[in-house]
Image: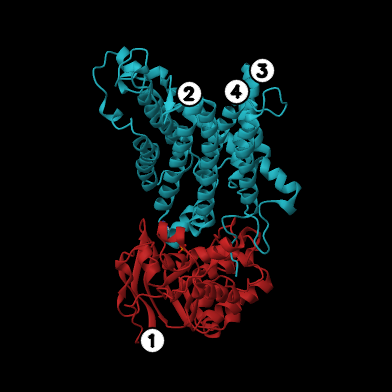
Amino acid sequence: MTTYQGIFDKSTVRFLAVLIAIAAAVPLLNTLDSSNPLHVSTYTMTLMGKYLCYALLAVAVDLVWGYLGILSLGHAAFFALGGYAMGMYLMRQIGDRGVYGDPLLPDFMVFLNWQELPWFWNGFDQFWYAALMIVLVPGLLAFVFGWLAFRSRVTGVYLSIITQALTYALLLAFFRNEMGFGGNNGLTDFKDILGFDLQANATRVALYIASAVALGLSYIACRFVVTSRLGRVAMAIRDAESRTRFIGYKVENVKLFIFVMSAVLAGIAGALYVPQVGIINPSEFSPLNSIELVVWVALGGRATLYGAVVGAVAVNYAKTYLTAALPEVWLFTLGAMFVLVTLFLPKGVMGILQRKSPANSSGSDDDTPKPELPQDGVKA
Amino acid sequence: MRLIEEFQHREKVFDFMMPNTSPALDVSKGYLLYLEDISVSFDGFKAINNLNLYIKEGELRCIIGPNGAGKTTMMDIITGKTRPDSGSAWFGQKINLLEMSEPEIAQAGIGRKFQKPTVFEHQTVFANLELSMAGAKGVFTTLMARFSASQLDHIDHVLNQIGLKQQRNLLAGALSHGQKQWLEIGMLLMQNPKLLLVDEPVAGMTHQEMDRTGELLSSLAGEHTVILVEHDMDFVRSLANQVTVLHQGSVLAEGTMDQVQSDKKVVQVYLGE
Ligand SMILES: Nc1ncnc2c1ncn2[C@@H]1O[C@H](COP(=O)(O)OP(=O)(O)OP(=O)(O)O)[C@@H](O)[C@H]1O
Ligand SMILES: [Mg+2]
């Protein structure tokens, strides 16, 4: 007796198929001769790798916002922390090849006349340690933050505001040179990752594929959660929190679990992003970044996961195009998109597609109804 | 793909029994609920005034009374939401309700349906019942939860009881008002309560829905004990049961509907209006 459809419903299978196809095709097309019209340049491939990281970040936001109803306006902070952890590893990979040639200290520390490596930079010469920190640091911050916020039952707009304050506080902190993260300039001039030259084509291909794999696996992990009973409890919390508490669920713990999971995914996205763009600086903590994320998800459609991916890719494609062609209109476009989606497309772009073709909408499986989205606009 | 799905839905057969009621529940005297000399006042206003109420096990008791008589407040006291200033409240002979928290009381086997129905509108009828199921509710337990055969049976049984078998996979938000009320009663039944407190279930229902609700509540009595608060006289009469009239926070009369209706005091304060 099938009571619920599993992790791999039609939409998930379709999404994974497209992802695998793109992950395989782009590196292949990259090997073609550059005179071939089908050739995909390394630049484009890396740009797409960046989009894949954004897509993963959007999925993380959708998990907490779409399914749990927590409108986090600070998710860029987890992304940036993951990015910094990776950046610290990449800095230490430079070794004595920096401008100042110090075997231990990164250039910016030498420049600041520091004599020794701050304690929290220890271990980052090891990839496994950096990988651990990529997961641990955003996860731990989300845990402490969530533990305090959810236990004191901060919800709605207030929660959104303090997540925004969190990322702003980190922005200010990371700007300071004394913090030991390169201040204003952040971390850059990376050379190698795991001993491979970051500028080499093969490394670029590997990073691109790693981003696709991370997105695919994270997507499956999120599907596992949202199709489990815990996922249904999360949606119950989203729609009627006190009722859920009354039934006997520990709402705080459910929120904490999903919030931490989401932060970890955001951290992984940040870590894959940094070697592809070659820099991480405090502007990644900018409150505007977090708001932009929410626009991606709102635009794509909440509580579907794939909607978040579509939104992230679409908005960033538009951004890449517009900031090059008409740089001054980008912010207005972003604002306009948010307002329009909130007013007219509460279910996002995926919502229209679903309405237009109910037959092939999200995994219509024999007797199982489609997941329904909340009707209200931006639920804070 | 099928294989993976099958694996996911494979029912684990561990027949843990759901914790119905507290083992401490002792109804050897035949009575399930004792409220004695209960008084509550809000800012000097006596909402409940020396209330005495005894409910037999398996009974369906209707409580009527004018607005503000204290009916909802009485339920608040039984469920631990409001603490009385004086008096005692016992669940069976051994469980002192006044010493317990709201969740503890719910755990001990007292379920309550509120005046305003709250179901999870964006989830199916089935999921609503699933979420209300008695049992472990920790994060990792729910993450890994699989249905046991007995749990599925229980859900099916409740779907039959509340007459929503056809609507099993419908979103709760798509149900009619009456059906939502039944679903909420079903959500209560999933927790296997010994005592059910039902506050004005038929408000806003059509006549057919009222009849169905009457049948449902009557069928629950026996296996469960039901306390029903209701304004609709015809509905209460149709259930033909013990009726308690509450007035200004205390019991004015008790008996069958006919007895109560011919009671002079009752006619005066309530029915006569
Ligand atoms: N928390 C409270 N604070 C102050 N007064 C209250 C509170 N709860 C109830 N009351 C008052 O106590 C009285 C009894 O209220 P209660 O809700 O129990 O009446 P009821 O019999 O359920 O009425 P109805 O038929 O309208 O539902 C009312 O006068 C109400 O205003
Ligand atoms: Mg009332």
Q: Residues within 10 Å of mark 1 (few under 14, many from 20)?
A: few
Colour of chain B, in one word, is red
Q: Which label belongs to residue B30?
A: 1
User: Which residue is tagged 2?
Assistant: A278
Horizontally, is A144 left or right of A258 in the view? left
The picture places residue B29, in percent across and down from the top left corner, at 35, 87
Query: For the residues tagged 4 and 2, is the chain the same?
Result: yes
Badge 2 element:
loop
Q: Residues within 10 Å of mark 4 (few under 14, many from 20)?
A: some
Q: Are marks 4 and 1 in contact (CB under 8 Å)?
A: no
3D distance between C-alphas at marks 2 and 1: 77 Å
Q: Are marks 2 and 1 in contact (CB under 8 Å)?
A: no
Badge 4 element:
helix
The picture places residue A373, in percent across and down from the top left corner, at 61, 49
Q: Chain of mark 3?
A: A
Query: For the residues tagged 4 and 1, is the chain the same?
Result: no
User: Which residue is tagged 4?
Assistant: A331
